[in-house]
Amino acid sequence: MTHTVDELAGKRALVTGAASGIGEAVARELSARGASVIVADLDGEGAARVAGEIGGEPWMVDLSDLDALAGHRVEADILVNNAGIQTVSPIEDFDPARFRMMIDLMVTAPFLLTRAVLPGMYRSGWGRVVNVSSVHGLRASPFKAAYVTAKHGLEGLSKVIALEGAPHGVTSNCVGPGYVRTPLVEKQIADQARVHGIPESEVIEKVMLTENAIKRLLEPEEVADLVAWLCGPTARMVTGTSYVMDGGWTAR
């Protein structure tokens, strides 16, 4: 995608889960296009490292602390709701507290952050909300009850933001990657091997990429490029939609 280096100059972006993986790649890409970036993460050290390298601002935050978040007001032109975690477990063994926490982190926290930034976006008549969903926002996999539920919820929230934001120059979209080469995915390999009863060496091909037509993991930078395009000037008419980057998984 062609873009100018300064197409987001003067814009302030908030990216959650930005100390590593997709979030870090997004923070770096938005910064490269001229935005000043708030690097939000539970990992304060990682957030400070990334912020230092891109001239951004670190924000150490626990997004599962909903009461603290509800009272927060943030000024940002761009919000990228990316923070997420995974748990691989059959439903009958799934810890209910863990289920609730994952919904809080991946649905309620994006709602609260969106609620915090929208007044400023409405005042300026411009805003971009990009929700990092997943192919699991559109499809299910066994042993991922909380994650699949959360991502389906995030897809719905994103569409409502799009409809409410449209008269105010605010767009909202989801980006739905398949498996991306990130610490989150690498941590899953051992869990998947255990629940499926196969060696770790077979997990990527037999579990993660079984539905993909293109047999490789996505790179975080590829996701970041699409996120940045959605924030840019040529995506003004793109709202309320979901872009999957799944190597053909959902084509089946």
Image: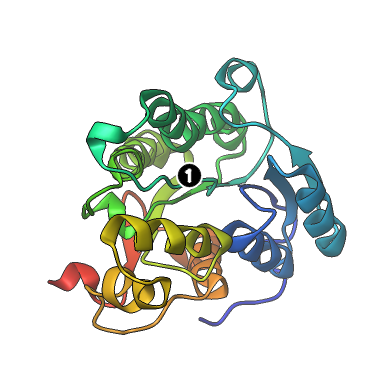
Q: Nearer the viewer, residue 119 or 112?
A: 112
Percent of width and height locating residue 176: 36, 59
Residue wearing tag 1: 169
Q: Quadrant of residue 189?
A: bottom left
Locate the C terminus and report the quarter of the image it occupies. bottom left
Q: Residue at x 35, y 36 (%)?
A: 157
Q: Is residue 142 above or below residue 166?
A: below
Q: How many marks?
A: 1
Q: Nearer the viewer, residue 42 or 160?
A: 42
Q: Nearer the viewer, residue 22 or 97?
A: 97
Q: Residue at x 39, y 82 (%)?
A: 216
Q: Amino acid at mark 1?
A: Gly
Percent of width and height locating residue 236: 44, 58
Q: Residue at x 32, y 65 (%)?
A: 244
Q: Is residue 144 above or below residue 120?
A: below
Q: Residue at x 68, y 39 (%)?
A: 42
* 7 sits left or right of 215 in the view: right
Disc 1 crowd, CA 10 A, few/some/many (<14, 14-19, 20+): some
Percent of width and height locating residue 240: 32, 49
Q: Is residue 103 above or below residue 211?
A: above
Q: Quadrant of residue 213?
A: bottom left
Please tell me whether mark 1 sits on a helix, a strand or a loop.
loop
Q: Quadrant of residue 58?
A: top right
* 201 sits left or right of 129 in the view: left
Percent of width and height locating residue 129: 50, 46
